[in-house]
Amino acid sequence: MKKLLFSLALVAGGAVLLPSCKKIIDEIKKNINPFEHTVDLTYTIPTLMQGQTYNADEQTYILNVNDVINDNTEGLDVDIDDISSIKINKIVLTLENADAENNWTNLQTATAGVNSDKGRTAGKADIESTITVPDAEAERYTDKTFTFADHNLKDYLNGGDTKIYYSISAKARRAVTKELTIKAKIEYSFKP
């Protein structure tokens, strides 16, 4: 009888401890600091005539969200379900080979867009941002930064590998007489 009572006490104690352990783990997960992840890509804009719009071929990148999360959460067992939002903070474009004749001011507008295989399968529109490039000397070599309206990419992403599609387009204010190489830095933010 004593053995039975002792066994029941152990089971009851374990039942009390399990929810308590889960609460501790949940509290630890709530204290995960927000973090960022960046992706670097390269685009080439060909020669353009004045007024011509160029749509670059889409660049793709495989993003494993759960790996990114685990790399930034100090060994906790965390995945996409433990993150409340994933956003694109910004996309920064750097013109690598600008000169006095061919630089940012040759372009009137530029648009950066993002989507994913999951987003497209679900019929979600690209997340886009458009900038107007002022026709001013100070703008010739200055990096261009795209910011995005409030959005949450969780609906666009799987926990595992997700194919992300990045696009840029530009409209020429003046003729672009040589190929321009653009480096793109995409900065994501993850918040618990």
Image (tube, grey):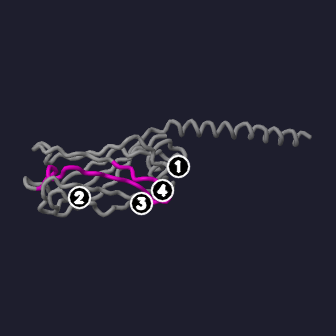
Is tag 3's residue or tag 1's residue first in the polypeptide sequence? 3
Disc 4, SS: loop
Q: Give amino acid for label 2.
A: Thr
Is tag 1's residue or tag 2's residue first in the polypeptide sequence? 2
Residue at 12% x, 42% y is: 138
The stretch drawn in magenta includes residue 88: no
Q: Which residues are magenta?
A: 102-128
Q: Give amino acid for label 3.
A: Ile
Disc 1, SS: loop
Provide residue 127's location: percent of width, then percent of height. 39, 50
Q: Quadrant of the N terminus?
A: top right
Is tag 4's residue or tag 2's residue first in the polypeptide sequence? 2
Q: Which residue is mark 1?
A: 79
Instruction: Say which of marks 1 and 4 sits in front.
Output: 4
Is tag 1's residue or tag 4's residue first in the polypeptide sequence? 1
Q: Which residue is mark 4?
A: 123
* 56 sits to left or right of 6: left
